[in-house]
Image: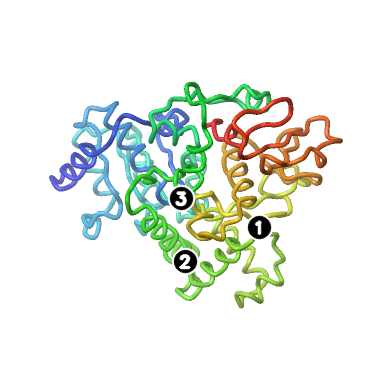
Amino acid sequence: MDTNLITYMRNQLANTPADFQRYMYERINWNDRLFGLVGPRGVGKTILFLQYIKQNFDRERILYISADNTYFATHSLVDTADEFSREGGQHLFIDEIHKYSNWSRELKQIYDTHPDLKIAFTGSSILDINKGEADLSRRAPMYYMQGLSFREYLAMFHRIIVPKYEFEDIIANRAEITGERHPLPLFRDYLQRGYYPFAMDSRFDVELNQVINFTMEVDIPQFAKMNVSTGQKLKKLLAIVAESTPFKPVMDKISKKINVSRNDVGDYFYYMERAGMIGQLRDATSGIIGLGKVEKIYLDNTNLAYILGGNATNIGNVRETFFFNQMRVNHKVFSSEVADFKINNCTFEVGGKHKGLRQIATMPDGFVVKDDIEYGSSNIIPLWAFGLNY
């Protein structure tokens, strides 16, 4: 193999931390012949791959490459895989595959040509393997990874190890942070800067703004074949969502505000959701998440809310954003006709410590989720507990 590729891989592995693994590490079937890991910018997909490589493989039989490496300006993925296979390679990891123009066609060719080669790739969360030049949907399971849970934040940045709690344990008030009497200061910090693995960098604000700008101005327009001016409209639309508490979409009004057709607004929201910039809360009329009517639109996570809203960030919106963001990883979360959210047959109203029980009084499985409380009782649950479910 080209020595530059080998050197690049070794340098990446040498700088890979091994003391903490994201939740997706144990969910991936690493033995699949072909699979993809997608997610928003900055959530740690690359580190996850490198950790697995570092801990499990003989490096003579593995190759980690990044598709945006200048090497691929004059070389193809197919030729690289062919050479690697001839030299006895068994596991090929391709990072940032969406940055390679013919990725789907060449990936299919590698898969079909080398049945003994296992291939894994990372890509943007808006990557759609069904829409590439070659349909890989029957061959490649896709894993979607989002940012840190409150539980992961505690482990990664504070060395506080907390087990994962199931939904039933959380609503029964059995979730706890052992040895930590006062979780609220840590929770406050998480809400503002704990969702991304680069949260403790001194330039966190700058880096997160870069994530937003690249996603809105480059990733989405390139994938959806939009022009540069459309990227600016996407950012304006994101600002509208950020200013709301929360945002209830009225398509006609939005289309006039950003000067696009009504139909385009729905497409823009779809791409923004796929890219990890917003979350769309739907009703349960269809019975299938993703197909119901959109009732509310939130920013994807609370860190985005604070970076975009600054001092004007609405705490009520932050609370609902956190609940929706954390619980959707393992559960179908719908809007509720009488309260904020519905999961399974349970209804949840989210608020501060003075939130009353009126809205869920007639619901047999109704719960009030309160911020600013350290412990819960009966059907009152602290908000931070919902961050321990993955």
Q: Nearer the viewer, residue 349 or 222?
A: 349
Q: Nearer the viewer, residue 155 or 182?
A: 182
Q: Nearer the viewer, mark 3 or mark 2?
A: 3
**Snapshot colouring:** rainbow
Q: Position of residue 89 (x, y in %)?
A: 24, 34
Q: Which amino acid type corresponds to the residue marked 2 in the rendered image?
A: Pro
Q: Which amino acid type corresponds to the residue marked 1 in the rendered image?
A: Thr
Q: Nearer the viewer, residue 74 or 24?
A: 24
For the residue carrying disc 2, how many other residues have a C-alpha within 10 Å: few (<14), some (14-19), or many (20+)?
A: many
**For the residues marked 3 and 2, what is the alpha-carbon distance in whole angstroms?**
15 Å
Secondary structure beneath dot 3 equals: loop
Q: Residue at x 63, y 75 (%)?
A: 257
Q: Residue at x 70, y 72 (%)?
A: 253
Q: Which residue is mark 3?
A: 40
**For the residues marked 1 and 3, what is the alpha-carbon distance in whole angstroms?**
23 Å
The residue most toward the left is: 3
Quarter of the image with the N terminus in it: top left
Contact between labelled residues 2 and 3, with CB atoms less than 8 Å apart: no
Q: Which residue is mark 2?
A: 221
Q: Which residue is mark 1?
A: 245
Contact between labelled residues 3 and 1, with CB atoms less than 8 Å apart: no
In which quarter of the view is residue 326 placed? top right
Q: Position of residue 125 (x, y in %)?
A: 48, 50
